[in-house]
Amino acid sequence: MASGIADIWTDVAPTSTFEGVNVVMNQQSSRYLLKQAKRAASGKKCEGYFKYVNHLDELCNSKSEARTLAEFSSLEHLEKVMMVNSAAQLRHTYELLSESDAVEVVKQNDLFADEVQRLSTLHIKFLLFVMARERIEETKFVDPKIKSILNLIIRIYALKELIKDN
């Protein structure tokens, strides 16, 4: 199960980018995600890769229906599990921030910094999985075996990240 792809991503994640260091970008991502949660809480719909935010309670209360190894390791199931993981952290972090009377900067950068960091990380891991899956599905490969190999790689990525996160 050690393809090394998740480790490679983790190795390069802390490096500088054109936008600044990834820590800053991670904070920006979490703030945008929290804005989406606030938007959904006010009754407005989130779209695109944030569509799952519209269903936080439903996702957080859902139970896995997988009964076999094949069902558990299916791309569909892994995507849902990663989505639920991100949704649960979003709901938890949003509730902590909403219930606190501290100044917003203090809440996000001090009191609940670990939760905010975890929120962004889980969301980004979920998006990496979804985007990779979409790209694999829409690409026409010359060798038909490539698609199954790439799907295996993203399965390994998801399983490794889920094991590490839980």
Image (tube, rainbow, N blue to C red):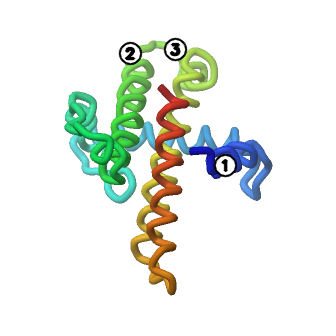
Q: Amino acid at mark 3?
A: Ala
Q: CA distance from mark 1 to mark 2?
A: 40 Å
**Viewport quadrant of the N terminus:** top right
* Residue highlighted by disc 1: 4
Q: Of tags 3 and 1, which is closer to the observer?
A: 1
In the rendered picture of this protein, how many numbered marks are placed on residues? 3
Q: Residue at x 76, y 49 (%)?
A: 20
Label 1 Cα crowd, 10 Å radius (few <14 / some 14-19 / many 20+): few
Label 3 Cα crowd, 10 Å radius (few <14 / some 14-19 / many 20+): few
Disc 2 element: helix
Q: Is residue 80 left or right of residue 149?
A: left
Q: Residue at x 34, y 37 (%)?
A: 84
In the image, is residue 33 above or below residue 47? above
* Residue highlighted by disc 2: 99
User: Which quadrant holds residue 10?
Assistant: top right
Residue 138: give x, y in percent of width and height.
41, 76
Badge number at residue 102:
3
As drawn, the residue found furthest toward the bottom would be: 142
